[in-house]
Amino acid sequence: MVDLYPDGCQTVRRTMPPYAGRIVIAAGYGLRACPAMSSIMSITLEWLGHCSFRLVSNGGPSVLIDPFDETIGLRLPPYDCDILLISHSHYDTAAKHLVPPEYEAVRSKGTSLVKGLAINALPWWHDQRQGKDYGSVLMFHFELDGFRVVYLSHIGCVPRQWAIDELKGADICFIPVGGVFALGPKDAAELARELAPKLILPMHFNLRHLSFTLGPLSDFTKLMSDSLVVKDWRVEIEPEDLPSSPNVLLMRHWPGVAP
């Protein structure tokens, strides 16, 4: 067992030892926890906390997804981006006022061509009652520097088969797992297995300092077979690093806490 989070939030299972710094964390996969990009084809993934992520590619624009405001108890780092994706207009996903304005935003369904990147946004429900409780969200999928990325936002129920077929087989998939306002661990695990991405990034689960309570990450990881662990909030991924079968990628998040 390894305590992935320094705040003692939860302990998760792992299938190999964690490492820090510029070190291979899984023999044969080669993921590195490091800030620098060294490959022509690479992507740097940064978990900013809760459901907010920043992706920086070597050959394309930077993408920031669902920035939150400090009401949730966490604080974003001082970051900019080329493209801002907003999945829905809630305080924990739509704090665009905290991001420097030199970006183009995507916050509506359909396909948008932004800075040379085709962003596909599919609408789905935020709850299990066809939006009657929390409305709808957007699920995003796009290809960034050769990596196919899927972001499932705060979906509250499993999408229909046509959407699953469109979202299958990604390299990186962000999926909510903590229930309450989104998918719970059982539905998340079943959906992850059906989508079969190479790397599964769990989000929307309980964290220390979060101002509301969600289910623990461990409820999801105990339902999944294989995990990779990075003891950092930033990881560089190259194409040859991707596993041949789905693995849950467990990371720290940016340590910012709201005052």
Image: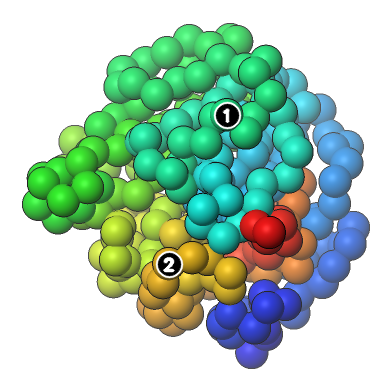
The residue beneath circle 2 is 212
Horizontal side of 126 relative to 66 (left or right) equals: left
User: Is 202 situated left or right of 161 in this image?
Assistant: right
Q: Position of residue 99 (x, y in %)?
A: 64, 29
**The N terminus - image quarter:** bottom right
Q: Is residue 68 above or below residue 85?
A: below
Which is more N-terminal, label 2 or label 1? Answer: 1
CA distance separating discs 1 and 2: 22 Å
Task: Tell me which residue sits at (56%, 15%) in the image.
Answer: 104
Q: Quadrant of residue 87?
A: top left
Three-letter amino acid code at the position of disc 2: Phe
Q: Does the image show residue 244?
A: no
Of 193 and 203, nearer the camera is 203
Residue in the foreground of this view, choosing between 180 and 18? 180
Residue at 46% of width from left, 36% of height from top? 94
Tell me what residue is drawn at x 40 percent, y 79 percent. 219
Residue 11 image point, x, y percent? 59, 84
Name the element at disc 2: loop
* Residue at the disc numbered 1: 97
* Vertical relation: 20 (above or below) 152: below
Position of 60 relative to 11 (above/below): above
Three-letter code for the amino acid on which mark 1 is drawn: His
